[in-house]
Amino acid sequence: MFKKTMMTLAAVALGAGTASAHVSIQVKEAPVGSTYKVVLQVPHGCEGKPTNVLRVQIPEGVIAVKPQPKAGWKLEKVRGAYAKSYDYYGTPTSEGVKEVVWSGGSLADDEYDEFAFRVYLTKDLKVGETLYFPTVQECSEGLAERWIEIPAAGQSADDLELPAPGVKLLEATGGH
């Protein structure tokens, strides 16, 4: 019995350590039809090597992206057309930032940092679903961690090895 309990505790501890090692989003819920500050938490590098680049893909239905510059990092905003035009407080919006890239910095494997950007979550997004921000973490010596896996129907992000960071969409709250 003791051996079985210890094995269970070890498995739980290992699972908890793995889950906390993922690039994740700080605030995991946000209402549609509102602005939202995405804060990506980067807890480590790649196989002991420092992170030099962080690339974040912006999902369809997320517009008005404004990334926060970071001292020591170059900021790039890759623009493109949206699949459709969205209403942004009365202004039709059909193109904008589709990817945010921070590069040229160095986040050691034993350090933690946050990368932030402000967005508008359009009313077209589906309440109750999770919206994913696929993220690629590039490190020195050509190493990378691709946090891009999105759960299939009936699957949980916990079932994935490299889950994309996500936010659960809530009902609109009114105002801006």
Image (cartoon, grey):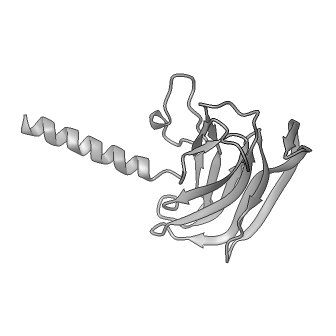
Residue 151: % across, % down: 56, 31
Which picture quadrant has residue 50?
Answer: bottom right
Above or below, 123 against 55 in this view is above
Residue 119 versus residue 48: which sits nearer the camera? Answer: 119
> Residue at image x 21%, y 43%?
9
Task: Give whichever of 74, 67 is nearer the camera.
Answer: 67
Observer able to see residue 14: yes
Q: Is residue 95 left or right of residue 66?
A: right
Residue situated furthest top in the rendering: 154
Q: Is residue 72 left or right of residue 10?
A: right
Q: Position of residue 104 (x, y in %)?
A: 69, 71
Horizontal relation, residue 71 to residue 113: left or right? right
Instruction: Let me know if residue 140 appears in the view.
Output: no
Q: Nearer the viewer, residue 149 or 59?
A: 59
Query: Going by the image, does 53 lie left or right of 109?
Result: right
Residue 93: percent from left, percent from top: 90, 44
List the single residue furthest toward the bottom.
72
Q: How many marks?
A: 0
In percent of width and height, residue 129 lies at 61, 31
**Residue depicted at 69% across the width and 55% down the height:** 55
Location of residue 166 (image quadrant) = top right
Name the outermost residue toward the left: 1
User: Quick check: 75 above or below 72?
Assistant: above
Residue shown at the point (69%, 40%) measured from the top left: 32
162 to 159, vertically: above or below: below
| Residue beneath the point at 28% across and 47% down | 13
Q: Quadrant of residue 40?
A: bottom right
Screen quadrant of the N terminus: top left
